[in-house]
Amino acid sequence: MNALELPTPLVTTDWLAERLGDDRLVVVDASVLSVSTAAGSRWLSGLDDYLIGGHVPGAVFADHLEEFSDPEGRFGFTRPTLARIARAARELGIDDDVSVVVYDSSLGHWAARLWWLLSAAGFPRIAVLDGGLSRWQAEGRPIDTGFQLPREAGTLTLARIDGFWADLDEVQRIVDGESDAALVCALSASEFRGETGTRSRRGHIPGSVNIPLGSIVDRETRTQLDGQALAERVAPATAGGAPRIVVYCGGGIAAAGTALALRRAGHPDVAVYDGSLDEWAADPELPLITVA
């Protein structure tokens, strides 16, 4: 069976609608919800919304909170092992013969996180649906409810690719001037400045520039900026000429959205700092900058 080729890491709703039902395609809903409680906001699986509110016809559901995270990780959404990624992906019907289109019901960052996980694991054919579920519904396209049984997966060959991830040691070397790379914070401007945030220590890692996830998304259509508009928005990341860009946020989710945008803008050496500020801010010896 010939593989279904994806035109870019971002596909349109038109492209997907024309190919729904193709045996070579697996569509994945990767939504996660933020809910407010008396104890503060927390993450909630998007499964109920997928089942009851509806999903793209034929889409299966990917669980970021459990299956595509390391349950033993110190922080939420710690990236899982290669073996765990392979098992979770095969349970969705993903194997060497299919291409994958992933979406979410937010700004695309949950979809981008799954794109990043699978791409870093060597899976070659995955794209994010531009505009996600919101655009799909706004265009009046069909929605299914209930559970979608995944296809039976065959062999899935994964092998970790270097360069996709940065760790605490690398970020420390960048801050200390021992590594030539740019640091990008994908959080909102107010969190970057240290005015808001839920961690006990606020602010940003020294030397960072701010490219919020929301700034690379058209808020009305939920589609990603492209062309010159995208190039101008991500320009601060390359202003210093560093060959490598490391993107972080709170827990490595929004960072995946901004990191994917940087790759789409033509920057090949982009990494996500998986621990992000959840890890950095937890160490009182590591510096954080606030802007009055």
Image: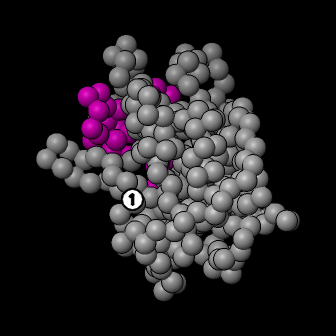
Residue ID at (46%, 51%): 63
Using the image as rendered, state which of residue 120 and residue 163 is in the foreground. 120
Using the image as rendered, state which of residue 199 and residue 88 is in the foreground. 88
Using the image as rendered, state which of residue 91 and residue 264 is in the foreground. 91
Element under disc 1:
loop
Which of the 4 quarters of the picture holds residue 59?
A: bottom right
> Can I make out residue 28 in this image?
yes
Q: Quadrant of the N terminus?
A: bottom right
Residue 292's place in the image compared with 227, above or below, is above
Q: Is residue 68 magenta?
A: no
Give the colour scheme of this rendering: one colour
Q: For mark 1, what is the residue?
A: 46
Residue 1's place in the image compared with 143, above or below, is above
> Can I make out residue 128 in this image?
no
Q: In the image, residue 30 lies at what x, y percent?
A: 49, 57
In the figure, is residue 210 to the left or right of 203? right
In the figure, is residue 1 to the left or right of 82? right
Q: Which residues are magenta?
A: 189-217
Q: Is residue 205 magenta?
A: yes
